[in-house]
Image: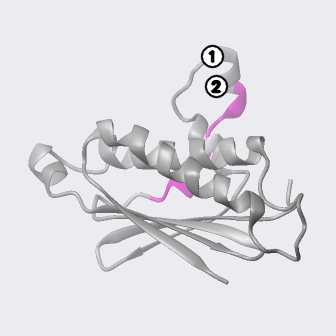
Amino acid sequence: MRTEIALKISGDLGELKGVREAVRAFLDSTKHIDIGEDQNAGLDAIQQSRIILAIDEAVANIIEHGFSDAQALAAAQISLTMCKEPNLVEFEIRDNGMAFNPLEHKPDTEFYYEEGLENGLGLIAMTTLDSAYERRDNHNILKLRREWGKK
């Protein structure tokens, strides 16, 4: 069985808290879905936190850097679609901002740890997920996927 939830997000950073809460609630619902009646199936707290951090960072980066000016940001079309299937969860973040492939910008983890920086840690968390990017019809499309039982 496939479950899908879609959110529309404005260009306001104040919406990030609601995005994080929606993703957490969605991920919490994976704990007891019917995947062979395995009570231990689903994502643990660490896996959930990595996904939430990656999505939070991706959406924050879109809002902060994806639009050329305030007028373009006011016309932002950002969406997050969350899907779960019996063996995985998948997230699609779509926006009409400037072309940007976050997967081409690998963070330097040693630099972040040495300097104690927080910005960009979501990009590091993204490396723990199966990720894909494409630019289609003037939209950035970032897909993040996680299978059950994958560490």
- Is residue 108 inside the magenta stretch? yes
Viewer-proximal residue, 104 or 133?
A: 133
142 versus 53 height, above or below:
below
Residue at the spot x=15%, y=58% of the render? 75
Compared to residue 11, the image places residue 35 above or below, namely: below
Evaluate if marks 2 and 1 touch, with contact meaning CB atoms under 8 Å apart. Answer: yes
- Helix, strand or loop at label 1? It is loop
Residue density around tag 2, few if under 14, some if 14–19, many if 20 or more, within 10 Å: some
Residue at the far top in the pictured view: 115
Quarter of the image with the N terminus is bottom right
Of residues 100 and 84, the one drawn nearer to the viewer in this rendering: 84
Number of other residues with Cα within 10 Å of mark 1, as a class: few under 14, some 14 to 19, many 20 or more: few
Magenta segment: 101-110
The scheme the figure's colours follow is one colour
| Residue furthest out toward the bottom | 1
How far from the left and from the top, in percent, is residue 57? 49, 42
Amino acid type, residue under disc 1 in the picture: Gly
Q: Secondary structure at mark 2?
A: helix
Q: Is residue 93 above or below residue 112?
A: below
Task: Tell me which residue sits at (28%, 64%) in the image.
Answer: 96
With 40 as the anchor, is 44 left or right in this view?
left
Is residue 41 shown in magenta?
no
User: In the depicted view, which residue is nearer to us: 119 or 33?
Assistant: 33
- Residue corresponding to mark 1: 116
Name the amino acid type tagged 2: Tyr
Camera sees residue 74? yes
Q: In the rendered image, which residue does mark 2 sit on?
A: 112
Percent from the top left, x then y, of residue 56?
49, 44
Residue placed most toward the observer, 120 or 10: 10
**C-alpha gap between disc 2 and disc 1:** 6 Å
Q: Identify the mark at residue 102; answer none if there is no mark.
A: none
The answer to whether residue 105 is seen in the rendering is no
